[in-house]
Image: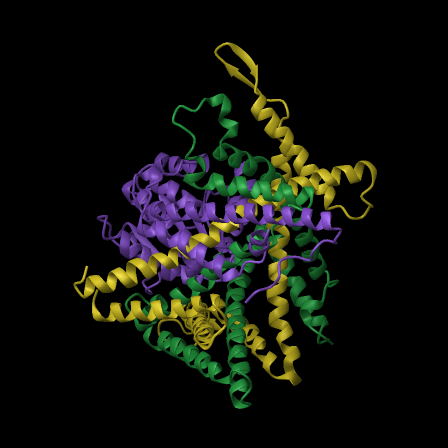
Chain colours: A green, B purple, C yellow
Amino acid sequence: MRREIPMIVAFLAGVIIILEFFVPMLRDVAGQIQQWYLVVVAFAILVGAFNLLRINYMKVRDRRADWPYSVVLIAGLFAMAIVGIFWGIEQGTVFDWLFNYLMFPMSSTMFALLAFFVASAAYRAFRARTVDATLLLVAAIIVMLGQVPIGSIWVPAGWPHSLIFLTPDWLKDRIMEIFNTAGQRAILIGASLGVVSTSLRILLGIERSYLGEE
Amino acid sequence: MKFVRWLADIDRRILFLLIAVAVVVPLIFPLGMRVKVTTQAQNIYDQVESLPAGSRILVSFDYDPAAAPEVHPMALAFLRHCFAKKHKVIIMALWPQGAQLAVSAMAEISREFDIVYGRDYVNLGYKPGGDIVIKSLGSSFPKVFPTDMAGEPTANLPVMARVRNLKDIDLVMDLSAGDPGIPAWVRVANALYQRKIAGGCTAVSAPQFFPYLQTGQLIGLLGGLRGAAEYETIIGYAGKASRRMDAQSIAHLVIILFIIFANVSYFILRRQRAEKGEGPKAGPSASA
Amino acid sequence: MDGLTLFGTWLAAILTLCILSFLYKDNPFYKFAEYLFVGVSAGFWIAYNFHNLLVPNLVVPLFGADGALPKLVEEGQLDLRLLTVIAGLLGITMLFRFFPKVAWVSRYGIAFSVGLGAGLAFVVYLQANCIYQIWGTVRLSPVVITESATGWTFDWGASLANTLLIIGVVSALVYFYFSKEHKGVLGATARLGIWFLMVSFGAAFGYTVMARISLLIGRMEFLIDDWIKGTLTTLGLL
């Protein structure tokens, strides 16, 4: 029963949400369980945060490799959480200051590193070895040129409309509106069919991996 | 040939340095290039223009600091346009950092316009749950947001008067860096409640939203820094995005040259190896 | 710039440079910033969820403004606020994951959220990402005729675009059909589909490059304008 009752809970929760679209009387019930979902999500986030704390605490306790950095992690976690919970999170609070001068710059810079790696990858790995790779490369170059003003800097003001297909801007727009839309649409349809079938499998109890091991 | 071989195996830190220079130099010495406006951006502008003054526009800040360089300028440009047209703006966030970024955006905007919190705009704050939150908004706004971000009951705020659910919203503008974001608003607010959705997103996610543009599920899209620069151009404001496009231009040019040089050196070395009767090389060697 | 802002700007700049130092090689400064970032982010999530989730959705519905627990029956009416206790209990079951002997209790909370998510996904994904997208394709006409002052004209551009879009969607979908071997007509169609997908991925790469470079531009702008120019201006040197 430790697996069967949760499966029934999953089934009931999902079916109420689906039926709500067709049975107006279920709207209040669906609204109520949607509110409950928000509470469960809050606890799920707490589980993640506590798990992070637990792993780093054990690293410090057992003096594993890089344990001093775990002290920094735990200190940062407690500082931010305590300051936010007890002194509020509005504009002008210490929490807001820490967000603007600690979290914001670090988060932005972590992702800014990717610019260097994407440039390095473009140089070291992007080779026109096959027809497919060449198509990908050519499309990427046209889009990169078309996205920025410098790509069209050679096009004079009176460029004839009949030759507009030679400009990176026009080519980029056609690639996005036709080829990109076609490819992304096929991916969207395929992925959505996958989501629908997985959702059905979960609701019908065929897919049980979310329950963990026996 | 030694030079070609050196080019093929170049230390990646030299590549990093070249990219850094390509970005920094135009920031110090701007070129002043202007972007052309696409129909996707123009459609958003035209939609805001067509709404009568006092229309209710929901702006959802669904991004984090990592996406701020691209999305924040478009948020500022869009808000400037809305307040210039005297629309009422209801701000919310499906990402927690989005609510903080909304605070910082409004701090800047409120210095430029004669707007009053509670009367002209409200910040409802963050709600987790993505699709579930949007679906709940379709039933009842007060149930999802009984108070604003500061704890003030939304029933007391004039801007929230007559906003019972999503159907009372005239336009949704979603500023998004992932999911929950534009996909969630299209899946729920447009598909279930037929709301008009406009989107602003990071460039990395923009290509996947073009199918939504073609079907009309999205009325317009601002993609990345270019989209932000386009909106600044349309409203006639010389903002950060327009300035950053110079650095973007040079960096793109450098990366294109990287690709061209790398492929030229690859084909030269491949032909050389074929002439010598050697097999194909595995790839560029790793360097520190 | 006031003192606190200047201090904050310098702190942000130092942390930025610590992270950028990874480009030379992994080092203690980068590791320090990385671990600090993870800790501060987790603390941010905890504080934010306390104020935006737990308090308005659990504490306030249960205890209300006066801080008293609601009665089950008030003036002959069942008080539905008590149902929020079920939400709290489901949430608390998630915490049982930390205790191996009773970890199975967390299945209730997980099953509830997974089931609810699956139910919603079933409807919205089918409607928005499947039916709408198919509708968007089948309503396209390969023959577009427009009315002008001189009469009806065949619009070559729109007709070609629509035709290519239809062919692209169908051939790319054929590529994703793996229940039959890609040979003959099916194989040729799948090959065409791959070409459309490759162009699509190339476009996605171009946009990805744009996105990453934009993030770098943002940080460089901060270092140049806010940090260096801001400090020099505050010290009266600029």
Q: Nearer the viewer, residue C53 or B200?
A: B200
Query: Residue B147: image x %, image y %?
Result: 36, 62
The N terminus of chain A is located in which quarter?
bottom right
Instruction: Count numbered badges in the picture.
Output: 0
Residue at the image point whose x is 51% and y is 56% from the top: B180
Left/right placement of residue A9 relative to residue C232 reads: right
Q: Is residue B131 visible?
A: no
Is residue A195 shown left or right of residue A66?
right
The x, y position of residue A99, in whole percent, is: 36, 68
The residue furthest left is: C236
Return the residue nearer the eye: B265 or B18: B265
Counting from the top left corner in percent of width and height, residue B179 is at 52, 55
Q: Position of residue A174 (x, y in %)?
A: 54, 34
- Residue A156 seen in the figure: yes
Q: Residue at x 30, y 69 (%)?
A: C10
Report the residue that reaches farthest toward the top: C150
Residue drawn 53% across the image and 67% down it: A41
Query: B111 above or below C89?
Result: above
Q: Quadrant of residue B287 in the image?
A: bottom right
In the rendered view, tell whether residue A59 sits above or below residue B72: below
The image shows residue C30, relative to residue B140, as above or below, that is below
> Quadrant where the C terminus of chain A lies?
bottom right
Task: Return the residue nearer the eye: B212 or A211.
Answer: B212
